[in-house]
Amino acid sequence: MKKVIALPEKFNFNAATTDHGWYMLPPFHHNENILNRVEALSNGNIVKLHIHQNHDQLIIEIGDKKTLTNKEWEEIIHKVNWMLRLDEDFSVFHKMCSDSQDMQEVVKENKGRLLRSPSIFEDIVKTILTTNTTWSRTIAMTTNFVTLLGERYVDELELFAFPSPEAVLKRDRNFLNQDVKLGYRSDYIYELAWNVSNGVYDLDVLKNPEVPTGEVVQKLKEIKGVGPYALSNILMLLGRYDFLPVDSEFKKHVKNKYFAGELPPVSQLQQLYKEWGEFKFLAYWFDR
DNA sequence: CCCCAGGGCCACT
DNA sequence: AGTGGCCATGGG
């Protein structure tokens, strides 16, 4: 079973999947230019997706012999569309890059798209799991989270879908701490799952580009565990690039590149990439 | 033992 | 609005 989607004229599959580290976090897997992922559909069906590019087409294959309904395919295509930002317009950003000496490669290679998860819940959880830790620990925590709480793909022992908020609530904070080893982040993740599951947070509305960024910022700030860095990262995942992710990596980068080893106060760091307006995050990202 | 990691919360100014 | 102590965990 497979489906073929026409791609935007300017599209770089390898860049869209690997220019950001998200492809290394389960349930994403990536090898030999194929993006793989176990996905739970809204009707409970668990499918394994294999996604790759063939010229101007995107091929989505299902890793088993199941026949999917049109409605299921519709959901898959909708999710893949979101993950790879197929509908997002990068023309303004590319125009700015073409006027910049250091950003020619972005235009030439059609860069700009950064992989994201189908659901905001998943991307917020993963973002919180990047805070105050190392990337290797983020991978470990995410792997534990998916393996211990996610629904298993029927045909293989080690493949799981990303856990639903309800799956998290079936366990307690202690399980998240001791077994999933999320540390103090356990309370944040548990509370997020509770608020999503009980309708306190409506995360899907944040996907709507019509909603002003200021409103999105206010809603994201309500989430415990989401500070300035996480806010910027989640906004990027939502397709809003106004805020810089000022974390240890950001500081390391600008310290070497712009301040010759002498780091100014954070208030000054927030002013960097100002000339990039609503594309500050992308400007920083592709400046590295 | 220490410090830090792609930080953030809370209490106190 | 800004600052310092604290937070679980693992690696150096």
Image (cartoon, coloured by chain):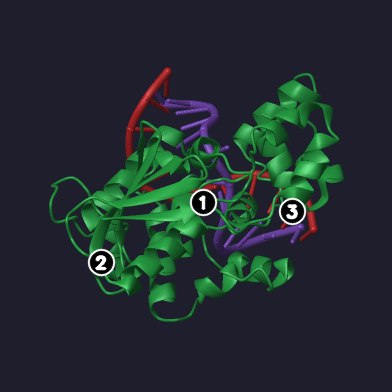
Chain colours: A green, B purple, C red
Give the amino acid at mark 2.
Answer: Leu
x and y, in percent, of residue A56 in the image? 52, 44
* Separation of marks 1 and 2 at Cα, in angstroms: 22 Å
Callout 3: chain: A
Residue A168 found in image quarter: bottom left
Between circles 3 and 1, the one closer to the viewer is: 1
At a point 40% along the width and 34% down the height, the residue shown is: A33
Q: Residue furthest bottom?
A: A199
x and y, in percent, of residue A112 in the image? 64, 43
Residue A173 found in image quarter: bottom left
Give the amino acid at mark 3.
Answer: Asp
Give the amino acid at mark 1.
Answer: Leu
Q: Circle 1 — which element?
A: loop
* Separation of marks 3 and 1 at Cα, in angstroms: 20 Å
Q: Which residue is mark 3?
A: A242
Callout 1: chain: A
Residue A84: numbered disc:
1
Q: Circle 3 — which element?
A: loop
At a point 22% along the width and 60% down the height, the residue shown is: A151
Residue A193 found in image quarter: bottom left
Q: Earlier in the sequence, mark 2 or mark 3?
A: 2
Residue A109 appearing in the image: yes
x and y, in percent, of residue A86 in the image? 56, 55
Q: Which residue is mark 2?
A: A68
